[in-house]
Image (cartoon, rainbow, N blue to C red):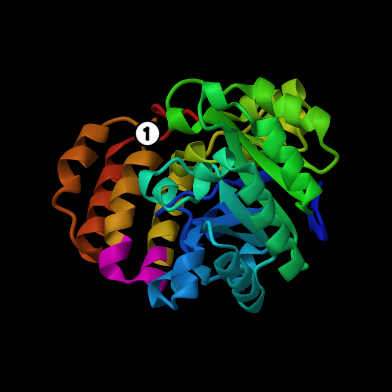
Amino acid sequence: MLTLGSLKLKNWLVLAPMSGRTNLPFRLIVKKWGAGLVITEMISAVGLWRGQERTYAYFKSHPDERPVSVQLFGAEPEALAMSVGIAAEKGMDGVDINMGCPARKVVKSGAGAALMRDPQKAGKLISTVRQKTPLPLTVKIRAGWSPEEANALNIARIAEDNGADGIFVHPRFASQGFSGKANWTVIAEVKQALKIPVIGSGDVTEPALALQMRSDTNCDGVMIGRAALSSPWIFKQVLEMERTGNFTIPSLEERYRVVKEHYFLLLEHLGEKRATDIMRGFLLWYTKTLPNRGFLKAMISEIHGKERLVAVVDEYFGSIQEGIGCEG
């Protein structure tokens, strides 16, 4: 079990927030496969402050995904303070402040990883949010801005001192983006120095690596991001491996079922056009280890609606045989 403030999770595994990916339908899928906590896509505090209807839509939730935390980004204390009030009104179970996103648009606004270059401002933002909400509060950071500005430990201490209930540590520098190797030593250093829970992230591409990260760094939990896009069942596999030393590989039938379930959830919540556009990308992730993906790649550009997508999925899964290339 992992405890973040007043929030007691059923296990120590967390779905990382991913822009354009961790919407409500995908969070519901991942929750079914065992994630202890799911987090929304990154939401702009300024967008909420300005009353942008599209930004409010990111709060859409469902009881079946609880507990769910909202990730906010921004550099204005007033905007963040207002945003956490909205999060409480919308029924969110926790709030996460993003101080690790390296995207140019986010950094240019002074938010995301840019806040790691301004520890005083970072502390003020965390303190402001803490004063405005009793919800469990976490902060997501990186190893630092660059190797020359490696200050994860300092920012983590500032977060703890200003009331954070937990820290997510992705041990790459903002200057790296998602390239290179995640330095898990950074996670271990932060864990050793802090009293609040530390959740590690980065390069957990298979079940054994989640257990290895926890063993190597002594972290309290593990956050999984990109690996979940192709294998949402990775959470169940990690927990199974923790119990038994092995994990079950999903059958072809189960993969087919997940693809269809995910698509119909997307249709229900996002409409046909957007659902189809999103699912086109997920099809290539879900079939990453399966044979005859060339067929799918060739057909992707022809998929523009529900009937065609369902037909292509049915034809593809009907053309491959159980047990061939089905690696977890």
Q: Give coordinates of residue 243: x percent, y percent.
A: 78, 33
**Which sits in the foreground, 62 or 237?**
62
Q: Is residue 236 left or right of residue 309?
A: right
Q: Secondary structure at mark 1?
A: loop
Q: Amino acid at mark 1?
A: Lys
Image point (53%, 70%), residue name: 59
Residues drawn in magenta: 266-275
Q: Give coordinates of residue 17: x percent, y percent.
A: 53, 50
**Which sits in the foreground, 165 or 317?**
165
Question: Does the magenta stretch mainly form a helix, a strand or a loop?
Answer: helix
Image point (58%, 40%), residue name: 116
Q: Give coordinates of residue 13: x percent, y percent.
A: 68, 43
Residue 245 in view: no
Q: Bin the neighbour count of mark 1 within 10 Å (Cα to Cα): few under 14, some 14-19, many 20 and up.
A: some
* Residue 271 falls within the magenta-colored stretch: yes
Q: Is residue 59 above or below residue 250?
A: below
Residue 209 in view: yes
Q: Which residue reaches farthest right?
A: 195
Q: How many marks?
A: 1
Which residue is tagged 1?
288
Q: Is residue 125 above or below residue 93?
A: above
Q: Is residue 223 left or right of residue 262?
A: right
Q: Is residue 115 left or right of residue 221?
A: left
Q: Quadrant of residue 53?
A: bottom left
Q: Give coordinates of residue 135: x percent, y percent.
A: 74, 65
* Residue 5 falls within the magenta-colored stretch: no
**Which sits in the foreground, 211 or 246?**
211
Image point (36%, 68%), residue name: 267
